[in-house]
Image: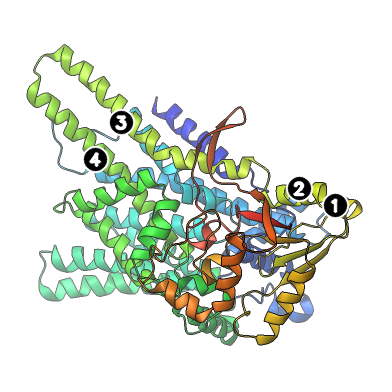
Amino acid sequence: MRKWLLVSLLCIAIYTRFVGIDWGLPYPMHPDERNMADAIQKLECSLSDLKNCFNPQFFAYGQLPLYIGYLLVQVFHVVINRSSLPITFYEATIALRFISATASIINVFVLLKIINLVITNQRKKKHEVKISSWFTEFMAGLICIFAPFAIQFAHFGTTESILMLLYSLIVLLCLHLLILKKSKKYVVLLSLYLGLSFGVKVSSAVFALPILFVFLYIDIYKSKSTFLKKIKAFIVNLLIVGVVSILMAIISSPYNFISFEAFLNTIRYESAVATGDARVFYTQQFDNTVPVFFQLTRIFPYVLGVPMYVCALIGFIFLSWRNIQHNFLRIAFLVFFIPTSFLYAKWSRFISPVLPLMSMFSVLFIFKLSDLIQSAIYSRVKLQKINRSYNYLKKYLLTAFTLIIILPGLAYISIYTNPDVRFLASQWIYNNIDEGAVLLSETANVVDIPLQSEISQKLRYYQNTSFNHYDLDTDSRLFGQLNSHLASADYIVVPSRRVFANYSCWKPDLKYSKKAVGYSPNHCDKIEMKYPRLSMYYQQLFSNTTKYQQVAKFTSYPNISFFGRTLLEFPDEMAEETWTVFDHPVIRIYKRI
């Protein structure tokens, strides 16, 4: 039975990770994915310049995923007999997404091993739920598979899925060390995974903190050796991890060391953006945010789904604090989450490595809840036949809990099984707006709408202005230019929430409120004082006090539909910006009346 269970979970995982894997192509919808794909296209090796052989000239991320993506494309070229042709953007992007999807699938089964390890090493009670049963293992697998964050990051050709997998592997090995006390094999494997993490993204150095905790616990706190032997064992383990991980980091990302100055300059810039020392337009949403509270309100409810989020929080707080495995999972979460939360930039991807831990807390909680229900039943009912019927009831309850938890993930798949919302909006424009019409849009949305293609260009031609709204309040010339565009524009296109949600407190389809969840209490007052022109612009546009009226709105919210009828929908436009703007932004079109 267990073999078929694992096969079933594998099939479900493959579908959820690979369905719609070509979303948005051939357009570069995700900026990080685009940069990595461009770097793969630039990889080359010439005998006349061996010093720069396979130098990607790109250091925001490590070379490991780039080299794997390059190798995948080259193998594909050999198979289809086109090895002499250059790598296309489409091929590079698909290769990166293939890596993310594969890493995400593997991570499902790593998480199952972690859950199995935690459950089976708890103190056994007579009627405790056991993960080894096919039923409970299948429920746990479904929760891990249908986590919304796992589905989204599997469809992005970026580093998040890889880092989540590596961190999960590190957590798994650390748990083995806690249980088995000492094993050099696990120490070496930890070193390898930590080094590979460096080769993916240098900021993953924080992955070493859970390892440090485990060494302190088993070598210093729990060891019964003499003090000198404790210190010696601790230092030996640290040396193994340090030497092996650095060697692996050099092997997996050699140009971080060969081109150290270029690498260092990139890290300085990225660090300045993350800390807020370098302000750029795409970090504006983090002004006046409250650390931790922003993640709790603007990220977790969306990336986990509300049911999983609630169960994870309850599990984190109320699961046994005397259980070393539970406490280690808490530590592995906090040592990464807390410092990241206090960065100025609070993108969802920054906390992605710990999101699988939240999935595990939700699983452990509903299993514990099932234990409590069963224990309560056994304490009151002694007849075996009645007990057996209550066992079935417990399974029905566990099934119900699981179905509720995975609903947001089931809905999230719709984003990749339906046409990209930017394609739908572009098609509407070509079908409903006369050729030659003047369109006013917003810049810095990766792609401009309507999307241009050979077919669409033959159908319609528009005067499309991609205007820089971001600097409207800092560049006086732009205000006059905007008024000029408004005087001549037939339509205004708002391609996403990137400007209005960050530079004003006016939201379309929502009532204006001075309260902004996750931000400081006076956030809206500060925004209106700092960006008075943009605030006034969106106030007038959204309150219908201008000559423009909304005539179309295109959404791709996660939803569950049946025969074209939406049964359940999860609006998430007000989540942390990057959760929506890359793969399912909301697009609004306003017409001059």
Residue 19 in the image, given as x and y percentages of width and height: 61, 41
Between the C-alphas of marks 3 and 2, the distance is 45 Å
Residue 356 in the image, given as x and y percentages of width and height: 39, 52
Residue 185 located left or right of residue 376 = right
Between the C-alphas of marks 2 and 1, the distance is 11 Å
Between the C-alphas of marks 4 and 3, the distance is 18 Å
Residue 371 located left or right of residue 342 = left
Residue 12 in the image, given as x and y percentages of width and height: 51, 35
Task: Indicate which disc, 3 or 2, sits on the residue closer to the N terminus.
Answer: 3
Per the image, the residue denoted by label 4 is 120
- 3 and 2 marks in contact (CB < 8 Å): no
Per the image, the residue denoted by label 2 is 428
Per the image, the residue denoted by label 1 is 456
Amino acid type, callout 1: Ser
Q: Quadrant of residue 290?
A: bottom left
Per the image, the residue denoted by label 3 is 398
Secondary element under disc 4, as helix, strand or loop, is: helix
Q: Which callout, 3 or 1, points to the residue nearer the camera?
A: 1
**Which corner quadrant holds the C terminus?**
bottom right
Secondary element under disc 2, as helix, strand or loop, is: helix
Secondary element under disc 1, as helix, strand or loop, is: helix
Binning the other alpha carbons within 10 Å of mark 4 as few (below 14), some (14 to 19) or many (20 upward) gives some
